[in-house]
Amino acid sequence: MNLEQLVSQARQGDDEAFYQLICQQQQQLYSVAYAFLRNELDALEAIQEATCRSYLRLSRLKQPAHFRTWLTRILIHVCLDELKRKKRFAPDFPDADGLTDPNRKQWEHTADKIDIEEALAKLTPVYRSIIILKYFEDLTIREIALRLGHPEGTIKTWLHKALVSLRKELGKGW
């Protein structure tokens, strides 16, 4: 069954069709959520929240062919909400990127990856979204424009500005 048929069935109340839709997207959803939140539990919680929101709002989806885009946008908003919440409730949290366990840092992250993650965390949410979708999800400019609902020219400009910011943050060696 294709995507549009599954969406149509899910809109008619077929929970199994909705489950199949989510299963088809699970790897991509996890990649996006983890790239934003950098914590497995937070990423899984964000996916759960986005799944719940999408289930409750499935009737609002205007074009079934854009289900992936719609779901990704919901997830990005959930991740951004979570980042705002963390910032609001833990302003003096010593390690804002979620990497609190020193042992985990040693085996999970190389020094370069930590530098990149810190630089990404300093980007604005829009710039971070574009970098994640472009380089972590390997999407084209057109696909990013569709997912975020902005013109391709705007996405190109934002991508350029995000890369300039990253280069400035990381230094000349990058």
Image (tube, helix red, strand yellow):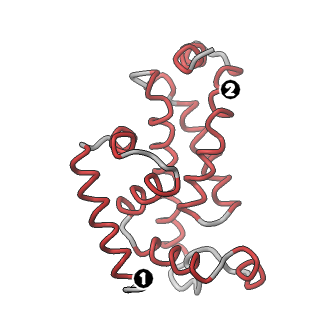
Residue that label 1 marks:
170
Q: Nearer the viewer, residue 73 or 32?
A: 32
**Residue 47 image position (x, y, % from top left):** 62, 47
Quadrant assignment for the N terminus: top right
Compared to 9, does 59 lie above or below? below
**Residue 15 image position (x, y, % from top left):** 68, 21
Q: Which of 85 and 120 is in front in this view?
A: 120
Quadrant assignment for the C terminus: bottom left
Residue that label 2 marks:
20
Compared to 38, does 75 lie above or below? above
**Residue 37 image position (x, y, % from top left):** 57, 63
- Identify the secondary structure beneath mark 1: helix
Which kind of residue does numbered mark 1 sit on?
A: Leu
**What residue appears at the point 50 percent right and 81 percent down from the top-left corner?**
91
**What residue appears at the point 55 percent right and 52 percent down from the top-left corner?**
32
Specify few, some or many for label 1: CA neighbours under 10 Å numbering under 14, 14-19, or 20 or more.
some
**Residue 124 image position (x, y, % from top left):** 36, 67
Which kind of residue does numbered mark 2 sit on?
A: Gln
